[in-house]
Amino acid sequence: QNYRVTALRDGFEPRQELVSARRGAAEPVVFKLVSQAATVILDSEPAGAAVFIGEKAVGTTPSTVYDLAPGSRQKISFKKPGYGDVVRTIDVPRAGRETRILVPLAIAADLASVRMVTDPPGAQIVQNGELLVGVATPVEEHLVEANKLYEFTFRHKGFMPARMKTRVGPGQ
């Protein structure tokens, strides 16, 4: 008796075969599946960079791209405000394969980063007399102009305000 058997696997083209079954015979059925695409996983540190392949925007990091030609070379750009742009040329893996790209982003030369932590956490932050709306401690990275004097005031209900002045060098 004949049976139509279909093999399905994510990322591969479906394959159908007509299989004959005979009483008492146990014959393996082998399917050679063809991959549909290569997978490229793109990320940056910090995350949230816009990703461009050539001139085409494809999303923000982290992002997974499935529509690149397997085995091709691609120019990929990572852009995030406050950080220097990074351009990488990658070799897209063979169909059915995966590659991961993690790009560290450097703070732009005219900026610096301030890390703010209070105990207890949850303090409001006032920068040079202006409340940073929607921002509370801890803040892992707050970008400011380099070599400029900043005064930060931390306000938390039930606590006296705390003030701090700082000047941070370029890229620090």
Image (cartoon, grey):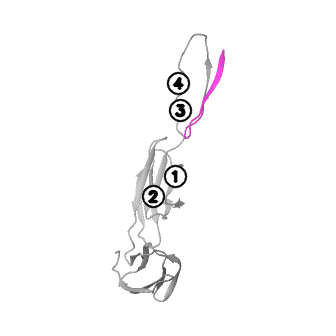
**3D distance between C-alphas at marks 2 and 4:** 37 Å
Q: Amino acid at mark 2?
A: Asp
110 w.r.t. 38: above or below: below
Splitting the image into 4 quarters, where does residue 113 fall?
bottom left
Q: Earlier in the sequence, mark 2 or mark 1?
A: 2
Could you tell me if the residues under marks 2 and 1 are in contact, i.e. CB atoms within 8 Å?
no
Q: Secondary structure at mark 3?
A: loop
Q: Secondary structure at mark 1?
A: strand
Q: Residues within 10 Å of mark 1 (few under 14, many from 20)?
A: some
Disc number for residue 43: 2
Q: Which circle, 3 or 2, is nearer the viewer?
A: 2
Viewer-proximal residue among 74 and 96: 96
Residue identified by numbered label 4: 30
In the picture, the quarter occupied by the C terminus is bottom left
Q: Residues within 10 Å of mark 4 (few under 14, many from 20)?
A: few
Q: Amino acid at mark 3?
A: Leu
Q: Earlier in the sequence, mark 2 or mark 4?
A: 4
Residue identified by numbered label 1: 65
Q: Amino acid at mark 4?
A: Val
